[in-house]
Image (tube, grey):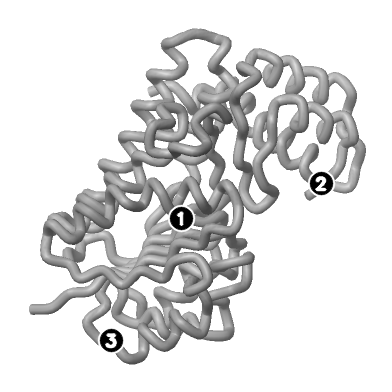
Amino acid sequence: MVKHLLVTRPDHDMVMIYLAAWSKIAIDSAEEHGYTIIKLDGKNATKETFESYVTKVPTIRFIVFNGHGDSSTVAGQDDKPIVKVGDNEHLLLTKVVYSISCSSANLLGKQSVERGARSYIGYDNDFTFAYDNNKMTTPLNDGLAKLFLDHSSIFISTVVKGNTIGEAHERARRNLYENFSKVIAEGLQNLTIASWLWLDYQAFVVQGDKDIRL
Amino acid sequence: MTTQKTPTDIKELVIARLDTMPDNIKIAIGNFGSFSKEQLKDHINKDDEIGKKIVEMQMSFIRAVAKGLVYK
């Protein structure tokens, strides 16, 4: 059976460039496990393009949003809203959504599930990460960013391998906590970096059904 | 986000913590963007929206440590 994963990857600022680069690992994993990938990259990461695909391609099972956001919105290129409470969250009906954006698991996540999304995984507070300014041109070689962003690859990879949303969330969350512990163990000079990891760990939540598999 | 002024001792505490970070590190915070250590400290000293957010986040962590919620 055909199964699609739709991923948005804006690239208008350094945060988005990092998220877009790090999502490659998960995309490769999804392809290896039989998913056809629909990539809305850069200027294609728009509400119009998203709505067009999600209404015309019923086999989209899994949606991954990379973007800025707030409790009721996930944005795309140039921070323009793609999905917003009261506007188009009904389009997430039957989908599993993972949103790597700030706070959207709060209201948008809950409303999406009430409107029929199977699960909405994201962050119920600000999502923060650290990166090495000397590695900006090669984000995938940035070991510091890896501490913060690896968990998202782990989550997506675990889902596409057929594990439950709950199992994937737990594994990803464990990765964040392990990285937090590792950074703390390296010394008190890392306490601030560790604090951002811990805050992300706290914010990473699931709304909806944890027991489903794709 | 509170509009009240952040107490000076709280600002100093958070800035002291930030000072332990290496200079080559940047922090991407929510929708606010990416900041160097010096930029973060500057925002805290200005007590603007970004500064208040940084302080809020760091104090959240500090309180959680004090309550024993952080270490398993």
What residue did someone put label 3 on?
A57
What distance separates the C-alpha of mark 1 from that of mark 2?
Answer: 23 Å
SS class of the residue under badge 2? helix
Q: Chain of mark 2?
A: B
Around disc 3, counting alpha carbons within 10 Å, would you say few (fewer than 14), some (14 to 19), or many (20 or more)? some
Q: Which residue is mark 2?
A: B49
Residue drawn at x 13%, y 78% is A2
- The part of the image, by quadrant, that contains residue A92 is bottom left
> Of circles 3 and 2, which is in front?
3
Does A59 sit above or below residue B23? below
A109 or B19, nearer to the observer: B19
State the residue position of label 1.
A100
Q: Is residue A135 above or below residue A9?
A: above
- The spot of residue A103 in percent (x, y) is 56, 57
Kindly identify the residue that appears in the image at 20 percent across and 65 percent down: A212
Give amino acid for label 1.
Answer: Ile
Question: Residue at point 18% right, 59% down?
Answer: A160
Identify the secondary structure beneath mark 1: strand
Question: Are the residues flagged by discs 3 and 1 in contact, CB closer than 8 Å?
Answer: no
Q: x and y percent of residue B68 in the render?
A: 51, 22
